[in-house]
Amino acid sequence: MLTDNFNVMLMGKPGTGKTSLALAMLDAVHKKNKTTMFVSTMAFSLLLKKSFNDKNAKFQVEKVSSAMKRADVLLLDDFGTEGGMNSSPVYD
């Protein structure tokens, strides 16, 4: 297991298995007793927008953000698609 911090970015067309591969990597790290977290950036973005007018949503954003900071490994899924750009019917 590597001890240095680093990032991994998986890119490719929809349906090529990027999320499945990332989840398998996350599972392998979790089995090494590291804390892991999966975040759908699309869902988090919607929650963030909702938090401007909803105190419960704001609390949820704070809770998720805190957990993201504490995780040894954080998986951000569909990063870049949360604004509607690059969307695909596969993900709708």
Image (spheres, rainbow, N blue to C red):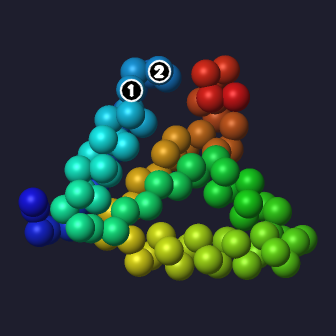
Q: Badge 1, how many Cα within 10 Å: few under 14, some, many 20+?
A: few
Residue 49: mark in rendering: none
Q: Is mark 2 on a helix, strand or loop?
A: loop
Residue at x 85%, y 78% (from the top left corner): 55
Q: Which mark is residue 15?
A: 2
Vertical comparison of 90 with 82: above or below: above
Is residue 63 left or right of 48 when viewed as pictured?
left
Front-lying residue, 81 or 63: 63
Q: In which quarter of the image is residue 33?
A: bottom left
Which of the 4 image quadrants contains residue 35?
A: bottom left
Label 2 amino acid? Gly
Judge left or right: residue 20 versus residue 83: left
In the image, residue 65 sits, relative to residue 30, either above or below, namely: below
The residue positioned 64% from the left and 78% from the top of the image is 62
Residue at 37%, 62% (x, y): give it.
36
Query: Which SS class for mark 1?
Result: loop
Q: Do the residues labelled 1 and 2 touch (CB within 8 Å)?
A: yes
Give residue 82's position: percent from left, percent from top: 64, 45
Residue 46, image x, y percentages: 74, 54
Q: Quadrant of the N terminus?
A: bottom left
Q: What residue type is labelled 1?
A: Gly
Rendered-image quadrant of the C terminus: top right
Is 28 left or right of 72, judged from the image as shown? left
Q: Which residue is drawn at 70% across and 72% down?
A: 60
Give coordinates of residue 13: x percent, y percent.
44, 22
Where is residue 15 drawn, in percent x and y? 47, 20
Q: Name the residue under label 1.
A: 17
Disc 1 versus disc 2: distance between alpha carbons?
6 Å
